[in-house]
């Protein structure tokens, strides 16, 4: 740990209570935003609010200084606002595709890079940024992040231990509280904030742990250097063909090795001065790793290009291509530093790291936004391949278009249903109706799955008890009931509340009612009597965008835009009142089941 970092070791007695209260507040607010129970869909507004609260609180905890409260708060709120805007414009989770998680990774990466750059600029000036300060803050933040979550884990384990201890003497207050979502979410926030504050006050101890971590990584550098060197030496004799035959994950494996090499190089060379390696083995290992990054990335680029040339764009391949391009920039920068710096190559790599960090931060932030839609690009490319005849309808990946490409893929399917080709129309219609991607596969499991779903659908049509009077159920409601597993596999009859033409319905499993027990949810049972799944008392459905979907009566997702605006205006005008209402609720044997739904 450098002298600059040691000089920042100052105590602030108010920091632990401030961050503890902030963490508790963030946890409780997050609970209010998330709500309780299973949420099949999270709206864009709730995602934005959740990200603003959590990101702002976490960033403030990491960057706050007693002597610079205003800029610390401004940076934290700015990060929270950026995260909120990005998640808001990315839309509700119901429209997310299989690769949307990479947007969140990019957002976290951008914020994670921006924090040490801001900290270094605040302490040493923004023009130019101090590499030693940025380097120390980056590693310190990483150590603090890991140790803070370790502290949370210890607090939670201790809480459950104490709860179990008091249960021995018949006091169940703590165990009951730990089952409440608002309590444990608030406890997680409080313990994270408190742990972060306590660790920040022990700067020298954290610095010592940071040095230990870098020492351990530095020792691993020669191992990885020898391994990568032998791998690259062996390639001319084995050729590249075994790479494609062994696995389909060639590019991820190579990129992971390149990232590992990059991490170990920086662990060895440190931030210069006293951190420079004195051991010759470590210096040579770092040099080999710095050189090895480029051929690894080059092979990954070739593998990615080969797959794209054969099968076209998909969101996964576009993400892989993006990471390959970023890794290529880093690899070239390191190789140029080695060539130009020779014996002093590390002195050239360190300032290059600052520029690379800024570039990666900006690119990651852009990739987190919906401005770059890999789903739309992939959809256009795959549909063009289909329409040009490069791939036949039988070989086309209809499951990817339906389930992996998000809203652009589903929109394209609707367009293909009007295709001039009868086989394309039939395949597109089948893909649109599919409830999961495996239904569209030709393997034996998928064929069995299709047969099971057909049997369950037929059972629902024949055996369902529809209230208030027996009425044929629409296809989209049958689909929702199949997802609920309301019938078949020992569930008994499906009891459905539905009137012809209605846009709302409710359903429950007969077995849930027959196995109801006081104080707990019913358990679904096989014929042998063994419980095998969670059995909710009642589920509600509402027709949205032409099909029935889950919803929670009275929740914000159940509001029309006009109702939501009326709530906003009423809150501003303090027009809040309590009224007696007449409710509608399901009763079984005279006992109310589930929540009121009207």
Image (cartoon, grey):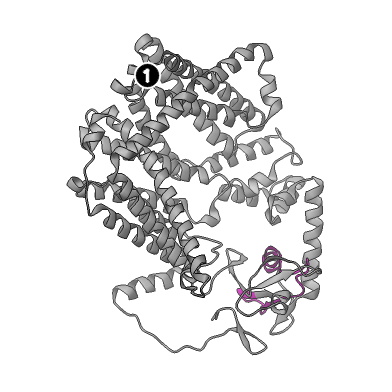
Q: Disc 1 on helix, strand or loop? A: loop
Residue at the (26%, 35%) spot, across then down: 120
Horizontal arrangement in the rendering, residue 109 relative to residue 419 (left or right): left
The quarter of the image holding the C terminus is: bottom right
Residue at the (52%, 19%) spot, across then down: 225
Identify the residue position indicated by label 1 in the image: 277
Residue at the (60%, 18%) spot, across then down: 231
Q: Is residue 475 magenta?
A: no
Q: Is residue 26 above or below residue 419?
A: below
Q: Which span of residues is magenta-colored?
A: 477-506
Q: Is residue 551 above or below residue 356?
A: below
The quarter of the image holding the N terminus is: top left
Q: Callout 1 environment at 10 Å: few (<14), some (14 to 19), or many (20+)?
A: some
Question: In this figure, what is the number of numbered marks?
Answer: 1
Q: Is residue 531 above or below residue 417?
A: below
Near-viewer residue (323 or 313): 323
Residue 210, quarter of the rendered image: top left
Q: Is residue 353 above or below residue 367?
A: above
Residue 30 appears anywhere in the view:
no
């Amino acid at each position: 740990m450098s002298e600059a970092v040691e000089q920042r070791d100052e105590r602030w007695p108010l920091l632990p209570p401030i961050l503890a209260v902030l963490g508790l507040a963030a946890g409780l607010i997050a609970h209010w935003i998330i709500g309780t129970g299973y949420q099949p869909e999270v709206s864009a507004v709730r995602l934005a609010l959740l990200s603003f609260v959590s990101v702002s609180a976490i960033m403030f905890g990491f960057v706050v200084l007693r002597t610079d409260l205003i800029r610390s708060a401004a940076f934290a709120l700015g990060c929270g606002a950026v995260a909120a805007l990005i998640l808001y414009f990315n839309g509700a989770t119901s429209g997310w595709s299989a690769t949307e998680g990479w947007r969140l990774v990019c957002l976290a990466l951008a914020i994670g890079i921006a924090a040490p750059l801001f900290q270094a600029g605040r302490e040493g000036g923004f023009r130019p940024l101090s590499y030693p300060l940025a380097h120390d803050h980056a590693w310190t933040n990483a150590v603090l992040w890991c140790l803070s979550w370790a502290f949370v884990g210890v607090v939670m384990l201790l809480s459950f231990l104490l709860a179990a201890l008091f249960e021995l003497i018949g006091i169940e207050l703590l165990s009951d509280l730990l089952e409440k979502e608002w309590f444990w979410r608030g406890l997680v926030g409080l313990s994270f904030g408190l742990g972060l504050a306590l660790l920040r006050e022990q700067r020298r101890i954290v610095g010592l742990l940071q040095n230990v971590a870098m020492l351990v990584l530095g020792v691993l550098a020669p191992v990885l250097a020898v391994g990568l060197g032998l791998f690259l030496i062996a390639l001319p004799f084995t050729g590249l063909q075994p790479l494609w035959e062994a696995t389909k994950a060639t590019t991820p494996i190579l990129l992971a090795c390149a990232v590992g090499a990059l991490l170990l190089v920086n662990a060895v060379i440190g931030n210069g001065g006293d951190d420079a390696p004195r051991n010759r083995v470590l210096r040579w290992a770092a040099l080999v790793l710095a050189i090895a990054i480029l051929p690894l990335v080059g092979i990954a680029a070739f593998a990615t290009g080969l797959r794209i040339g054969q099968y076209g764009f998909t969101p996964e391949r576009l993400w892989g291509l993006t990471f390959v391009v970023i890794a290529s920039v880093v690899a070239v920068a390191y190789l140029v530093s080695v060539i130009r710096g020779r014996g002093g190559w590390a002195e050239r790599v360190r300032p290059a790291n600052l520029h690379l960090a800024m570039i990666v931060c900006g690119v990651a932030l852009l990739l987190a936004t919906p401005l770059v839609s890999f789903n739309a690009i992939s959809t256009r490319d795959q549909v063009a391949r289909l329409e040009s005849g490069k791939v036949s309808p039988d070989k086309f990946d209809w499951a990817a278009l339906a389930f992996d490409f998000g809203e652009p893929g589903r929109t394209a399917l609707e367009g293909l249903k009007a295709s001039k080709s009868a086989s394309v129309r039939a395949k597109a219609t089948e893909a649109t109706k599919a409830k999961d991607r495996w239904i569209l596969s030709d393997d034996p499991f998928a064929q069995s799955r299709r047969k099971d779903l057909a049997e369950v659908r037929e059972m629902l049509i024949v055996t369902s008890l529809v209230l208030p009077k027996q009425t044929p159920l629409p296809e989209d409601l049958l689909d929702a009931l199949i997802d609920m597993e309301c019938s078949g596999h020992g569930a008994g009859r499906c009891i459905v509340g539905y009137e012809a033409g209605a846009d709302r319905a409710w359903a429950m499993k007969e077995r849930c009612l027959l196995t109801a027990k006081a104080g707990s949810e019913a358990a679904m049972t096989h014929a042998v009597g063994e419980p095998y799944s969670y059995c909710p008392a009642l589920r509600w459905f509402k027709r949205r965008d032409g099909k029935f979907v889950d919803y929670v009566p009275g929740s914000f997702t159940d509001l029309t835009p006009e109702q939501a605006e009326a709530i906003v205006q009423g809150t501003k005008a303090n027009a809040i009142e309590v009224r007696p209402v007449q409710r509608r609720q399901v009763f079984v044997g005279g006992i109310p089941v589930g929540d009121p739904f009207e």
